[in-house]
Amino acid sequence: MYLGLDDTDSPDGMCTTYLAALIAEALEAGGCTVKNMRLIRLNPNVPWKTRGNAGVCIEFDGDMEFASQTAGEFIEKYGMFDCENTNPGFAVCAKKPAPDFYYQALREFCTVEEAKAVLDSVGAVYRGYKNERGLIGALAAICAELPDKTYEYLAYRKPEAFGTPRVFDAESIRTSAEATFPHVWDTWDFSADKPVCIPHGKDPVLFGIRGESPEWVEKAVSYLKTEEVSRFVIWETNQGTDAHMLSFTGEFLEGRSYVFDGTVTAPPTTQRGGHVSFAVDGVVCYAFEPTKSFRSVVRELLEGDELTVFGSFQGGVIHVEKFCLRSPAKKEVRVSPRCPVCGGRMTSAGKGKGYKCRDCSGRVREPVYTERTLSAGWYEVPPDARRHLAKPVCRISE
């Protein structure tokens, strides 16, 4: 049996994974056997998502009617119905549908009517609330196939702690990351020197540890010092797999994510708000302000660089998630020289006049060139700007 549910949370609280954990416990208490728990991320570009756009699936042995009744009771008790964008749905199937609907929900868009048609075709018991959009994620989670999969250890807070500051020892998180990377990732951001596995909202999650296997995430958790955990689930997921990416075939469609090869045809330019734009074969690409240090890397790109770009097409531009610099353009970069007298940094003395020292009378007539610092290889956004589905560079084997 498969029980899928989605869209029970809101920006103000709750979490569909937490609700699923409660339902799984109730199923076990009612005589069912829970075999697997799946957290399935879907198209990150849909405009109506509440937070991370994910559905969940509980695989179990047991009675369909009991599971349906239990899911309905918990959703009606805990679902965030007051939120306009919260539209819960659940489905119970004895037969797992073909994965076609999953791939459509992962990479494109689906309608509630399409979801109902598939559910009816396999004799599912289901229910949607409000506009019933949660049925889409519920079905997609049920029929998902994972040729590549990762795991996330989600620990949940005690109910009395919901909405209060999370209590954790930051140094223990750093130690955990140092001991388990690259088998575990997105635990600590070493460039910003801060934890990234601790959420900031009012939801029930205390922390989430992502890794290659249940054993690795459990090892990472063993280092952590936090407030008391009420319960946890190790979820099987499609996170960190690039499963949402489509190979470019000649036309970019709004709201889809693509991987494509090309050559930089317009150099990086910093726009208002700190966003950095450049063009690859005429296609405008952006590293937006929330990607922070990644923008500094993007600014070093030059015309003629050959790239493989990963990103989503929204508003007529590519939102870059990562890129591989396949073949750097052969070009020297002109830099301000050091003063031969005092060693200070020099500035331009005017067009054709060389350089002058800011601290003394030193002058240099000829320009100075240096080799590029950006070499061939992979470059990605920092952990706190990474989409759930985006594969981190530490998982790329080439």
Image (spheres, helix red, strand yellow):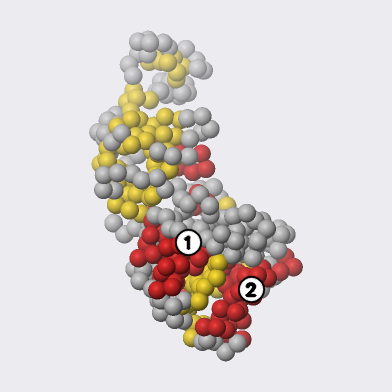
Task: Give the residue drawn at x 61%, y 81%.
Answer: 26
Answer with the quarter of the image where residue 351 lies.
Answer: top left
For this view, does 158 lie left or right of residue 42? right
Q: Residue at x 46, y 50 (%)?
A: 45
Nearest the viewer among 244 and 375 is 244
Q: Which mark is residue 253?
A: none
Report whether 26 appears left or right of 124: right
Q: What amino acid is labelled 2 in the image? A: Phe
Residue at which label 2 appears: 74
Residue at coordinates 39% horizontally, 50% vertically from top-left? 256
| 248, above or below 112, in the image | above
Helix, strand or loop for disc 1: helix
Task: Please state, as top left, top right, bottom left or bottom right, where the C terminus lies in the image.
Answer: bottom left
Work out whether 392 lies above or below 221. above
Amino acid under disc 1: Val
Going from N to C along the chain, the mark reached first, 2 or 1, is: 2
Question: How far across and how far down the image is residue 360, in percent?
Answer: 50, 15
In the picture as drawn, the residue positioned furthest to the bottom comes out as 31
Q: Is residue 375 left or right of residue 57?
A: left
SS for dot 2: helix
Q: Position of residue 394 (x, y in %)?
A: 39, 57
Q: Is residue 113 visible?
A: yes
Q: Which residue: 29% across, 48% down?
A: 248
**Residue 112: numbered disc:** 1
User: In whole angstroms, how far apart are the C-alphas of marks 2 and 1?
Assistant: 22 Å
Percent from the top left, x then y, of residue 122? 41, 76
